[in-house]
Image (cartoon, helix red, strand yellow):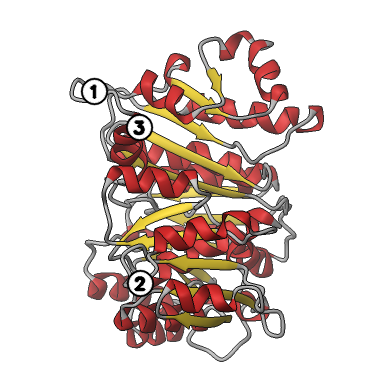
Amino acid sequence: MKHVLIVDTPPMFREFIKDKLSEEKIEITYIQEKRDAITKMISILPDLVIMNIDETEDIEYFTSVIQDIHKDPNAGRIPIIATGPFMDRNNLATFAHLGIVKYFVKPIKFDVFFESMGTILKTNFSIDSTPCVLDIHRNGNIVFIEIARGLNREKLTLLKYNLTELIQNDKLDNPKIVVMMTGLELTFVDGLNLELLFDNILAAPKVHTKNVKVLSLSSFTRDLIDGHSQYDGIEVVTDISQVLTSLVESNNTSRVSDLITDNILTNTETDTSTMEMRFSSDTKGIKSDEPVSPTPQTTSQQSNSMQGNLFKVAIVDDDQITQKLLAAAFFSAHFECDVYNNGIEFLSSINKKQYNIIILDILMPGLSGFDTLKRLQGMQKKPPIIIYSQAMRRELVVQCLALGAKQFLVKPQKPENIVQKALELINAQQ
């Protein structure tokens, strides 16, 4: 039987790994202290060691532990996978020299993680490949879970641990859950996966059925919830205003537009997660800094690049700095990119080009982004539109969403975040 030693990993990360390895009949041993790792490695001779570097940890201390392991003739032969914060190349080169075969930057994409583990252990891990975009974010005590394309069992299982980690790290006493999956058309064949979704949500601490709202157009989803006594209290709605009215405590306003901008478009969470809800397959073509190996080799991220099969993006913004930043980020993700200074330029070309995504500013001279959006209303097979603007008037935000914009992102944001959201919207339509 294969044996994996897990050293000083965060609780939820550890539990998820243990569950997955147990499914494959792989024995697991866990220890808390890194200094005990060499003794344990010599005594049990595991096939693989998974070791975590905490964000506050002294790198010199971690390096000294690895050096001691590397010097031992028995422990030094055992491969090590490490996880931790972003590292510079000098540290990575040192780690590689000391026997760390892969270094994963947190939060971790687990499909690549298990691929690396499987190569080392000579084990084929069963990974559900169903296309699925699953994202989780928080505003106050409301946790939004967005699901598109399909239901992937790996991600639905991971959701339990990620949700638990979020609730515990952010000390949420009365979390309220909004599951948003209006784009999913579900039937009885999805029944087991739907049950897995709701079971994992309810398995998280302090989550009660009365505080779980499901935004869905699927009659099957409603019937499934109605048919299970353990889901009694979960409400299925078709209108976002129903969700917010029932969950948001607001004495100052009853306007749906206020509730939308205050509680969905404004994200107050600080990302403390160790586990990534996205997999590498969700973001085809986007470069990743995980896993990192200082030795020359072809990574799965490189082999999945979109060479010869590029997406096309239109960036409509009069600010040249924004143009350059976004264009560079999209180009790095293997997009073809056209830049327009205003709505008139863009509309004169839209019928000659076929874009996969449009990034549109609102505040532009001449034809504004809002007017451009209205002109696009009659367009057949309109690509997804992301509004990226400094405009923050609630009425304008709601009007843009009503006119078909898929996202409203307030400037400034990291360009990589815009690319990430664009890929999610593109993949959700495929």
Name the mark on residue 142. Answer: 3
Based on the displayed image, in which of its 4 quarters is residue 286 positioned? bottom right
Q: Is residue 50 visible?
A: no
Check disc 2 and report the residue beneath it: 366
Please report whichever mark, 3 or 1, sits nearer to the chain's N-terminal start. Answer: 3
Q: Position of residue 364 (x, y in %)?
A: 33, 70
- 425 displayed left or right of 315: right
Instruction: Report helix, strand or loop for mark 3.
Output: strand
Q: What amino acid is found at the position of numbered circle 3 in the picture? A: Ile
Pair 3/1: label in front = 1
Image quadrant where one finds the C terminus: bottom right
Check disc 1 and report the residue beneath it: 250
Task: Tell me whether the residue at label 3 lies in contact with that at label 2, contact meaning CB atoms closer than 8 angstroms.
Answer: no
Based on the displayed image, in which of its 4 quarters is residue 8 positioned? bottom left
- 377 displayed left or right of 360: right
Q: Position of residue 205 (x, y in %)?
A: 40, 26
